[in-house]
Image (cartoon, grey):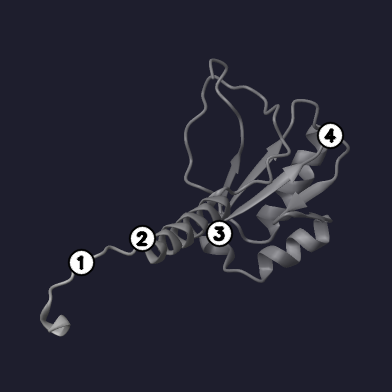
């Protein structure tokens, strides 16, 4: 009469470990995707009138040598113009980030390209002096 004996219930933890590992990888990838910049700029200029902006839909980084970075790759001004024109410029928020030693003329060139492409929401990245 072995068939009628009750067995003690066991909790299998291996499928639970698989699910937890999948969730860990999923949230790690999601978190990395939410970071808008490539993290190459670490010396933003300071301003006492900084305010927090929502995450930009397009971040343009100006390197110390004048090179432009957008969406993780090096771009020219014409490529940035084409990149903006592929999207709805009226709803696009662009943030321009440059280091302390970035040329002001290069910043103005980028702003001109962004504004002539039809973007109305343009922000400049800066950090507060106390942070």
In terms of secondary structure, where does tag 3 sit? loop
From the top left corner, tell me how far across and down residue 74 is, in percent: 82, 54
Of labels 1 and 3, the one closer to you: 1
> Which residue lies at the image location 57% right of the left edge and 68% below the top edge?
88
Q: Quadrant of the N terminus?
A: bottom left
- Label 1, secondary structure: give it: loop
Q: Nearer the viewer, residue 104 or 62?
A: 62
Whether pointer 4 and pointer 3 mark residues with C-beta atoms closer than 8 Å, the reply is: no
* Residue 128 in picture, x, y percent from top left: 55, 22
Which residue has dot 2 on it?
13
| In-front residue for pair 18/81 | 18
What is the distance, in whole Å, between disc 1 and disc 4 at their CAs? 65 Å
Callout 2: few (<14), some (14-19), or many (20+) C-alpha neighbours within 10 Å? few
Alpha carbon of mark 2 to alpha carbon of mark 4: how far? 52 Å
Q: Are marks 1 and 4 in contact (CB under 8 Å)?
A: no
Q: Earlier in the sequence, mark 1 or mark 3?
A: 1
Front residue of this view, candidates 127 and 15: 15
Disc assigned to residue 64: 4
Q: Earlier in the sequence, mark 4 or mark 3?
A: 4
- Mark before the other along the chain sequence, 1 or 4: 1
Seen at 47% across and 35% down, the residue is 52
- Residue at 62% x, 22% y: name it: 46
Q: Are marks 1 and 2 in contact (CB under 8 Å)?
A: no
SS at circle 4: loop
Q: CA distance from mark 1 to mark 3?
A: 57 Å
Residue occupying image coordinates x 72% and y 54%: 70
Q: Which residue is mark 3?
A: 92
Horizontally, residue 30 falls left or right of residue 116, namely: left
Give the x, y percent position of residue 67: 85, 45
Q: CA distance from mark 2 to mark 3?
A: 47 Å
Residue under label 1: 9
Please tell me how crowded label 4 is: few (under 14), some (14-19), or many (20+) other residues with Cα within 10 Å: some
């Amino acid at each position: 009469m072995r068939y009628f004996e009750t067995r003690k219930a066991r909790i299998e933890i291996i499928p639970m470990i698989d699910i937890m590992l999948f969730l860990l990888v999923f949230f790690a990838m999601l978190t990395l995707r939410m970071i808008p910049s490539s993290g190459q700029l670490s010396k933003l200029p300071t301003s006492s009138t900084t305010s927090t902006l929502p995450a930009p839909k397009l971040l343009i980084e100006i390197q110390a040598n004048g090179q432009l970075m957008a969406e993780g790759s090096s771009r020219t001004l014409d490529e940035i113009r084409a990149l903006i024109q592929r999207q709805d410029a009226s709803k696009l928020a662009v943030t321009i980030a440059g280091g302390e030693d970035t040329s002001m003329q290069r910043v103005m060139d980028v702003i001109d390209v962004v504004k002539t492409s039809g973007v109305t929401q343009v922000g400049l990245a800066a950090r507060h002096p106390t942070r």
